[in-house]
Image: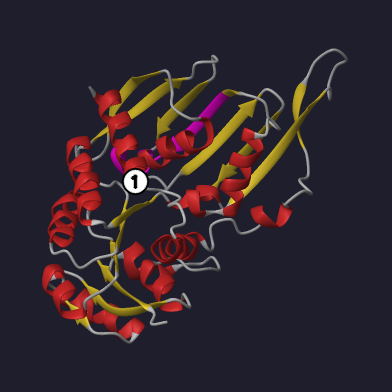
């Protein structure tokens, strides 16, 4: 069976360069994921910056181009990853899908800048029978999937309090937090912005609170990217607690027990023996798994782990918060 032909549009960090810059093991770019998957062939890379496109072409030993639509016509890919700046996702995706040749499109988050655009793209892909995925990468990590299974099985009880610290704005990296909360805990009952600050350059940053039907809540705190890149979470549930830092690369687990005074219950750090290997390098294969999920969807009808509808739901939450 011929391999699926893959094209990467956008040769920046997540498209290509993280494979050269990463200090952690694993596959960290879309180009690497396609180049190494046994059922895909990376046929070309595209970037509006000709020098960046040529550099990525040399890195992956494939042709390079600067015009996305022309590249799709020239190279006839089955799969396309869209790794361009946020504001280009919707217009580029719409143009490529209308050409009618694609089987699947994997878009970096956010799917669009507005929910109305995302909804149009979801409808357009459905009409043209193009599978639409969004790279909220933690959904593709077995570690994050394991937590979801445990929550559904009742191992941790209900969420009491989640605390996220994130940077790069609510629509960009804050949307990772919103998507992960949906993935683990479902839809909130209410949402609100609790404070607004100004980042260098005048960009606004937001803190937010989400509340769930059973009384649990999640608090999002924006951290200035000019100081450090921060994406971390702390999750306190009825039966246990866990934390992750470095975007999910480092984890700690806690159990509930009386550790200080009789009659008082504390969250106490506890080694995790069950599935411990999942949490050793939980992010190293996310993009590889995302591409594998896309391939299995196209070839065998497997459900997408993060669909266009998921990307649309996050944008609707963001707009509800900012209304």
Which x, y percent locates residue 70? 11, 73
Closer to the camera, 37 or 262?
Answer: 37
Whether residue 221 is situated above or below residue 291 in the rendered picture: above
Which x, y percent locates residue 296? 46, 63
Please state the extent of the stretch shown in magenta in the rendering. Answer: 161-174
Closer to the camera, 66 or 168?
Answer: 66
Rendered residue at 59%/56% (across/down): 282
Rendered residue at 68%/30% (across/down): 154
Please tell me whether mark 1 sits on a helix, a strand or a loop.
loop
Rendered residue at 29%/39% (across/down): 312
Residue 101: quarter of image: bottom left
Which residue is labeled 1 in the image?
226
- Residue 109 falls inside the magenta stretch: no
Rendered residue at 72%/52% (across/down): 275
Categorize mark 1 by other alpha carbons within 10 Å: few (<14), some (14-19), many (20+). Answer: few
Q: Is residue 15 left or right of residue 72?
A: right
**Is residue 177 at least partly visible in the picture?**
yes
Whether residue 164 is situated above or below residue 196 in the rendered picture: below
Closer to the camera, 322 or 1?
Answer: 1
């Amino acid at each position: 069976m011929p391999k699926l032909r893959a094209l990467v549009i956008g040769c920046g960090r997540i498209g290509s360069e993280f494979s050269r810059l990463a200090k952690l093991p694993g596959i960290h770019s879309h180009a690497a994921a396609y180049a190494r998957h046994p059922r895909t062939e990376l046929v070309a890379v595209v970037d509006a910056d000709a020098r960046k496109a040529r550099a990525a072409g040399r890195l992956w030993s494939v042709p390079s181009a600067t015009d996305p639509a022309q590249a799709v016509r020239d190279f006839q890919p089955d799969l396309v990853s869209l790794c361009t700046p946020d504001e280009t996702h919707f217009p580029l995706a719409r143009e490529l899908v209308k050409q009618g040749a694609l089987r699947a499109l994997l878009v970096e988050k956010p799917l669009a800048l507005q929910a109305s655009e995302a909804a149009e793209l979801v409808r357009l892909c459905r009409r043209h029978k193009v599978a639409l995925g969004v790279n909220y990468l933690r959904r593709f990590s077995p570690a994050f999937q394991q937590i979801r299974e445990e929550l559904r099985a009742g191992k941790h009880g209900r969420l009491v309090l989640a605390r996220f610290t994130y940077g790069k704005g609510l629509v960009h990296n804050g949307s990772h937090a919103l998507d992960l909360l949906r993935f683990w805990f479902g839809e909130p009952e209410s949402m609100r912005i609790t404070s607004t600050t100004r980042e260098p350059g005048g960009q606004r940053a937001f803190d937010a609170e989400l509340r769930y039907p059973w009384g649990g809540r999640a608090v999002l705190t924006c951290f200035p990217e000019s100081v450090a890149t921060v994406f971390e979470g702390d999750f306190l549930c009825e039966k246990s607690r866990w934390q992750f830092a470095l975007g999910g690369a480092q984890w700690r687990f806690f159990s509930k027990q009386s550790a200080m005074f009789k009659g008082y219950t504390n969250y106490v750090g506890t080694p995790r023996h069950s599935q411990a290997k999942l949490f050793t390098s939980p992010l190293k294969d996310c993009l590889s798994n995302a591409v594998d999920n896309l391939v299995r969807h196209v070839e065998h009808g497997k459900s997408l782990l993060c669909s266009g509808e998921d990307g649309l739901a996050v944008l609707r939450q963001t707009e509800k918060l900012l209304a």
